Image (cartoon, helix red, strand yellow):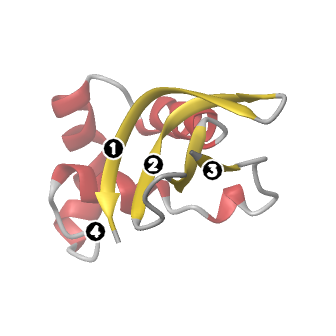
Amino acid sequence: MHLTHNKGSDNIADIGYEELAAHLLGVDIDDETVYDNLEDMFYDKYEIDLDQFETIARELMNCIQFGTSLFDDKKIIVGFGTWEEGLATMFVKKDKHA
């Protein structure tokens, strides 16, 4: 498996955590009622506030690994893992075909 290491990004603050939270809830962030109640809606479902969610999401960003299989270059592997000395250890992965 050939993986690309995610070394983080200076642009991580550009990630729309409120938009991501709305996506996870299956709601439209552009709806004013949703926007005004997003924090409560998110807490009701996940029992964490949006600040905690942002902290967790930032930490997970550094664990994202992706690449293609050495045996099937159309097989894309995406998941959470660690990167050490050119080798990735995947904790959670999902295989897809391009």
Q: Amino acid at mark 3?
A: His
Name the one closer to the observer, 84 or 47. Answer: 84
The residue that label 4 is drawn on is 29
For residue 94, which numbered disc appears in the image? 1
The residue that label 3 is drawn on is 2
Q: Residue placed farthest to the bottom in the image?
A: 30
- Between circles 3 and 4, the one closer to the viewer is 3
Residue at 45 percent of width and 48 percent of height: 78
Q: Amino acid at mark 4?
A: Ile
Residue at 16 percent of width and 62 percent of height: 27
Instruction: Say whether disc 3 or disc 2 marks the residue closer to the N-terminus.
Output: 3
Q: Amino acid at mark 2?
A: Val
Position of residue 61 in the picture relative to residue 45 (left or right)? right
The residue that label 2 is drawn on is 78
Query: Pointer 1: residues within 10 angstroms few (<14), some, or many (20+)?
Result: few
Image vertical order of residue 31 relative to residue 88, above or below: below
Q: What percent of the width, then of the height, locates residue 67?
A: 56, 54
Instruction: Say whether disc 3 or disc 4 marks the residue closer to the N-terminus.
Output: 3
